Amino acid sequence: SEGYSITPWEARGKIDYDKLVEEFGVEKISDDLLEQIRRLAGDLHPLIRRKFFFAHRDLNLVLDDYANERGFFLYTGRAPSKAPMHLAHIVPFIMTKWLQEKFGVNTYIEIPDEEKFLAKKVDSLEEVEPYVRQDILNIAALGFNEDKTFIFRDSEFIGRMYKPAVLVARYINFSTARAVFGFDGETSIGLIFYPALQIVPTLFEKKRPLIPCGIDQDPYFRLQRDIAPRLNRFKASELLAKLAWGLTGPESKMSASEPETAIMLNDPPDTVRRKVMNAYTGGRATVEEQRRLGGVPEVCTVFHWYTLLFEEDDKKLEERYWACKTGKLLCGECKAELVKRINNFLALHNKRVADAEKRITKYMYDGKL
Ligand code: SF4
């Protein structure tokens, strides 16, 4: 596409989500659908209420299945890299955990510990090793129900995955995979097989799988939907998110390789302070101008993160918006408050990580890590 590109391995440029919805052939989440979720779940998580999760495939069918007691299951994942997880990484897991809690369904979490290596994002398998355990702990610490959550890493669980992966791989032709993922002559043949492994967990139960993930992951499940009927399984349903902004601007992504863009889950409080205080805002050049003209929360990364994770109350978010717009709120104060909230969140999160450590094998599919 012109101006931007989006694949599971890379997103560049200013993303036009309307165009993406059309190109990918997904649907936007309608207000009717939101109401249905609210009716069944009792309330709506801010991430979906504010349409950060904005598009879907077959979410209506998932809700039907639930309402008619056929059930469904959740599946999502995280590919460990050579750095710890950051705030943008946990957004889909927070959504998934909410869905698990509200609908009481089984949740499968794949840890593809080979993906970054096959995609040539890291130089050795050993490089990601220290982060595998840390990522699993960070995920478990978000409050997943240990009786209904099954976490597994590809390199360890492969014996149970290989047969279904072979079935999946048999039905996907190279020309299709190349068209969907943009593989080229430099792509490792490992990466060409890898989509089979990401599709396998959608086959784990004879129920409809719902996958909350970033819209960049859609290509995998587009392929899954082509072949699922031949494997006598349901087509994957998806709940699709936009890509969260990095701290350096609305077109930036949080990226561990550019530390100033991202709040890592293990950043100490003074690092969080420095990063947020340097973040890109919609503020004016001088205090005088800001008082006179007001700020522009629409392009402000600080406001973006209040919207995603750090202001649950819609009324308070709206108050912040107008205080900014009318010049009553200045960026220094607004950022300082976000620093406080992020640091409180991280302190609590890291306590939960320590707690999850004691019970971690309970989350593992076969009790091994
Ligand atoms: Fe952003 Fe807050 Fe500054 Fe407004 S006052 S531009 S919301 S940091």
Image (cartoon, rainbow, N blue to C red):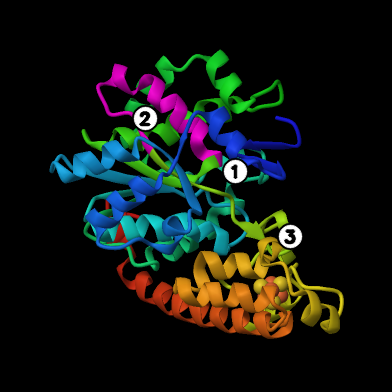
What amino acid is found at the position of numbered circle 1 in the picture? Lys
Q: Label 3 near label 1: C-beta < 8 Å?
A: no
Q: Is residue 6 above or below residue 98?
A: above
Q: Which residue is mark 3?
A: 249
Instruction: Quote the CA–CA distance across marks 2 and 1.
Output: 19 Å
Q: Which residue is mark 2?
A: 162
What amino acid is found at the position of numbered circle 2 in the picture? Tyr
x then y, percent, for residue 96 = 37, 55
Q: Is residue 216 left or right of residue 44?
A: right
**Segment colored magenta:** 216-237
Q: Residues within 10 Å of mark 2 (few under 14, many from 20)?
A: some
x then y, percent, for residue 3 = 76, 36
Determine the residue positioned at 53% across, 41% down: 215
Which numbered tag is attached to residue 343?
A: none
Residue 272 makes an appearance in the image? no
Instruction: Quote the CA–CA distance across marks 3 and 2.
Output: 42 Å
The quadrant the N terminus occupies is top right
Residue 336 makes an appearance in the image? yes
Q: Is residue 261 left or right of residue 364?
A: right
